[in-house]
Image (cartoon, grey):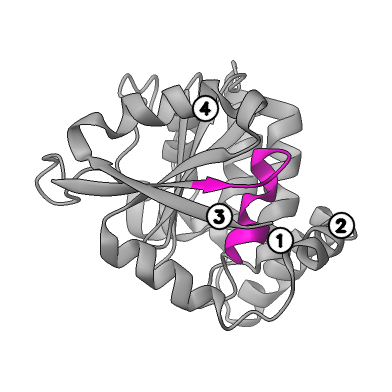
Amino acid sequence: MTFTSIQVPGTEAVERLNELRDQFAKTGKYPFLIGPHQDREMMIKSAEFNRQSPEEIIRASQKIDLEDWVAERREEVKEYGYSPYEDLGEWPGEIHDKGSLILHKNAVTGSFLPEVFIGLAEVETSWQLPAVLKFGGWNDCPEAEVQCAFHRKWQAEFGAEICSVGGGVIECTVNRPPQDQQSAMQLAWEQYWYCADIVDQGCETISNLGATLLKSPYWFFWWD
């Protein structure tokens, strides 16, 4: 399992990404948006610290019990005297802005980047992408095998497909997002344990996250 990349103008990145996604069944090369040159280089260098092969990471991911993994995370934060229920918040009602892909844009201004990279990975399906990229295992970002386990679950349940990886960010397109408040909140809790930064340094409450996930075709994860 390997990946290569092509360079495209930021203004054309999403259109080109979608074209390559449509061709995946024929080419066997799964496309994903990386972002600018420095994000591509950082991802390659970070992967050098993980000596597992992609195949080993995938096999390890299939042995992970995510309920046990989440329970361990709960115990870890409890030891620090913190309760995530402090960040539950109140349901804010419907949020109309459901987001979009951002790695082809300037994070501050929202303007298109001049040039970005699209990766092409030899995988069978999108949840295997973190294994090829060896993404994770730094700061609070889960190890690559945990990444694969969560995204395998979410791909099966929600039709979520990883479409961007770069700069500490993973973005997904979602074919079957949650359609009611209860299922959106259940998913929000899962995503919080997987990536607390999207609440702690992002939408501020788990209820806000749940409202954002409701009927949303995009997911965003970011680790500081």
Depth check, mark 2 against mark 4: the one in front is 4
Give, as a single range, the part of the protein colored magenta: 120-134
Residue located beneath label 4 in the image: 21
Q: Which residue lies furthest to the right in this view?
A: 63
Give the crowd class for mark 3: few <14, some 14-19, many >=20 residues within 10 Å: some
Q: How far apart are marks 1 and 2 (CA)?
A: 9 Å
Q: Can residue 155 be seen in this view?
A: yes
Residue located beneath label 3 in the image: 3
Q: Distance between the residues labelled 1 and 4?
A: 24 Å
Q: Is mark 3 on a helix, strand or loop?
A: strand
Q: How far apart are marks 2 and 4 (CA)?
A: 30 Å
Q: Is mark 4 on a helix, strand or loop?
A: helix
Compare marks 1 and 2 and give the one earlier in the sequence.
2
Which of the two residues, 94 or 49, is positioned nearer the viewer here? 49
In the image, which disc is placed on residue 65? 2
Q: Quadrant of the C terminus?
A: bottom left
Check if mark 2's residue and mark 4's residue have beta carbons within 8 Å. no
Give the crowd class for mark 4: few <14, some 14-19, many >=20 residues within 10 Å: some
Compare marks 3 and 1 and give the one earlier in the sequence.
3
Q: Distance between the residues labelled 3 and 4?
A: 15 Å
Depth check, mark 2 against mark 3: the one in front is 3
Residue type at numbered disc 3: Phe
The residue that appears at 80% across and 55% down in the rendered structure is: 66
Residue type at numbered disc 1: Val
Depth check, mark 3 against mark 4: the one in front is 3
Compare marks 2 and 3 and give the one earlier in the sequence.
3
Check if mark 2's residue and mark 3's residue have beta carbons within 8 Å. no
Residue type at numbered disc 2: Asp
Residue located beneath label 1 in the image: 146
Compare marks 3 and 4 and give the one earlier in the sequence.
3
The residue that appears at 74% across and 42% down in the rendered structure is: 152
